[in-house]
Amino acid sequence: MKYFDYFYNMIEIRNLHKSFGGKPVLAGINLDINKGETIIIIGRSGCGKSVLIKHIVGLLKPDDGYIKVQGENVNELDPHQLYELRKKFGFLFQGAALFDSMTVEENVALPIVETFRGMSPENVLETVNKNLKLVGLEGANRLKPAELSGGMKKRVGLARALVSEPDYIFYDEPTTGLDPIMSDSIDGLIKDLSDKLNVTSVVVTHDMFSVKNVADRVAMMHEGKIYFEGTPSELIHSNDKIIIDFIKRTGS
């Protein structure tokens, strides 16, 4: 890979600080997220994982430091540029965030209907069907969210995240609330999609099984900083007390 391609297809986070009400949440985050990798971000509740993600997509502005996405400083973008930047991201929310009044097809189509208003109904349907097939839900178009299991809802949410062909997919606790078999299935899907689509995946989770099964690299947040960065094996075999305590608390 050429250096130019590498630099402009990554997320660069430098010395990121953010406080709320005088309380530091991010206290100097430094992290690179590389093209095509699956990185898992772990840490105790309240450690700032969600705050970090909101900075990456420009929903929050830092008190100090910066984030660059494909060479662009997020904090310097105007509203139109931010809108264009956010098209590069797909999100799978913790509860899937489906609209109960819409069918599976309508939920999945929503981002392309909103973003690509000139697309014909035939092309919209073709795109929806392609992405439902990718997540193993071919033919589920007419079902409503109330008719879906928890795992199926996650898959619909993932299909919706994929329809705009993003460069990055963010997963917020993708296996929370699922039984072990379905959790393994979602982990396998994340890995499979990463390999097939060469999409960059950022997974926020407490699930150490997902860390073992999915991650190319792990970043652990602690006291507002990146406390650990390395492979899943390096994390699991660490002798560091804080890391050992975190793993024990997850029950893994």
Image: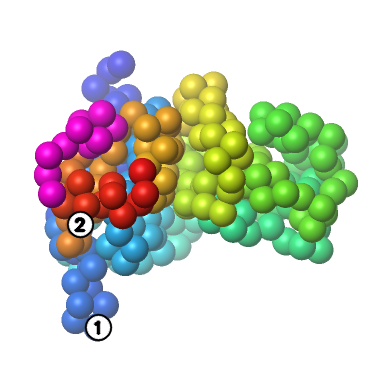
- Residue at point 20%, 46% (across, down): 244
Whether residue 56 appears in this view of the structure is no
Q: Is residue 199 magenta?
A: no
Report the residue that reaches farthest toward the left: 240
Real-space Cα separation, disc 1 to disc 2, in angstroms: 19 Å
Residue 120 drawn at (x, y percent): 81, 40
Badge 2 is on which residue? 222
Which residue is disc 1 drawn over?
A: 21
Image position, residue 188 (x, y; %): 54, 29
Position in image of residue 186 (x %, y %): 57, 37
Q: Is residue 237 magenta?
A: yes
Q: Which amino acid does label 1 sit on?
A: Gly
Stretch in magenta: 231-241
- Classify the position of the C terminus by image quarter: top left
User: Would you identify the image quadrant in which residue 122 lies?
Assistant: top right
Side of 163 relative to 126 (left or right) = left
**With 126 as the anchor, is 156 left or right in this view?**
left
168, above or below 145, in the image: above
Residue name at image x 24 percent, y 83 percent: 21
- Residue drawn at x 26%, y 43% is 219
Element at badge 2?
Answer: strand
